[in-house]
Image (spheres, rainbow, N blue to C red):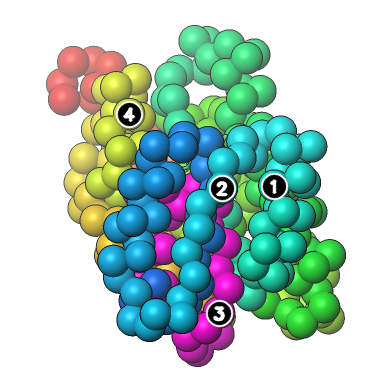
Amino acid sequence: MKDFNDKVVYIVGGSSGIGLATAKALAAEGAHIIIFARGKDRLEQAIKEIRDKKISSSQRFSCMQVDVSIWDEVKAVMSKAVAEFGAPDVLINCAGRAYPRVFEEITYEQFDETMKINFYGIWHTTSALVPYMKQRGGYIVNVSSIAGFIGLFGYTDYSASKFAIIGFSEALRSELKRYGIRVSVLCPPDTDTPGFHEENKTKPEETKAISAGAKLRQPDEVAHALLEGMRKEEKYIIPGFDGKLIFLLKRLFPGLVEFVMDSTIKKVQAGKL
Ligand SMILES: NC(=O)c1ccc[n+]([C@@H]2O[C@H](COP(=O)([O-])OP(=O)(O)OC[C@H]3O[C@@H](n4cnc5c(N)ncnc54)[C@H](OP(=O)(O)O)[C@@H]3O)[C@@H](O)[C@H]2O)c1
């Protein structure tokens, strides 16, 4: 997708962080933007900020409340959105959250909620919208993470959900080509968002030490990389040099990556870091 002008873009999780930055970047390219999330106040504030970026008075902007973890709700809200704005040319599945903790502290309820929001959420929106999108093609971006290709200390539930997104997206990409629908996965590194600050409240020291050397990205840098990645139709869109390097190292030298992480973890546990 080279040009976003006049395209209908649905951004799930578009009221904050990476989703909001992406919505603003696309509004500045002339797209019509519909954002989805649970919280009404944040949605309304976000849509004002997004509208401020418009380049034409014909652009349309709206927000709708939905909890992506609830299938019946997603079906109803998405069919209402399609009736009002038409099928999306672009669907960006960005809703997600993390509560890092060691495995023994993660309850069944937390694991279940993580999978329902981060993974089932994407399954739900995609299932609700592909029947409409396949009539004229389009683009789907599913947001995973660096923790979607490296199982990270403190992220047994989150990494599981983010690995699942990559497997799902690869299979979906293969299936939807025949309808002219392209599928990419965005794997952001640590990014300075409200969600990231929330995540830091429970992050184990080992996890903090592992990511200490990596640069914290700004949401608009990630949004810029996402748009560039979509223009090139990249399968994996990985913003920043650090993330791309980790991706390559994990593929080529998985033992080395594990060795470096284990050494850091041991130092923290021995009180040397
Ligand atoms: N920030 C990072 O360092 C980082 C790194 C790698 C990957 N990611 C991924 O990037 C995505 C965005 O993260 P972010 O840091 O930008 O988070 P954020 O600032 O917390 O924004 C999350 C967005 O998702 C929405 N959301 C959460 N749960 C939802 C639900 N059940 N139903 C509908 N909407 C829901 C939130 O709105 P409501 O709460 O009002 O519903 C909000 O709009 C997530 O998938 C995250 O896992 C982030």
Image point (73%, 80%), residue name = 137
Cβ at disc 4 under 8 Å from ligand 1: yes
Which residue is disc 3 drawn over?
7
Marks 1 and 4 close (CB-CB < 8 Å): no
User: Dot 2 lies on which element?
Assistant: strand
Looking at the rendered structure, the kind of residue marked 2 is: Met
Labelled disc at residue 198: 4
Marks 3 and 2 close (CB-CB < 8 Å): no
Residue 146: image x %, image y %? 44, 50
Q: Residue farthest to the left?
A: 272
Instruction: Give the distance between the C-alpha atoms of the residues marked 1 and 2, in whole angstroms.
Output: 8 Å
| Residue closest to the eye, 74 or 19 | 74
User: Dot 1 lies on which element?
Assistant: helix
Instruction: Give the distance between the C-alpha atoms of the residues marked 3 and 2, in whole angstroms.
Output: 18 Å
Cβ at disc 3 under 8 Å from ligand 1: no
Image point (66%, 23%), residue name = 112
Cβ at disc 1 under 8 Å from ligand 1: no
Going by the image, does 262 lie left or right of 128?
A: left
Q: Please check the rendered image and state whether residue 153 is part of the magenta-colored stretch, yes or no.
A: no
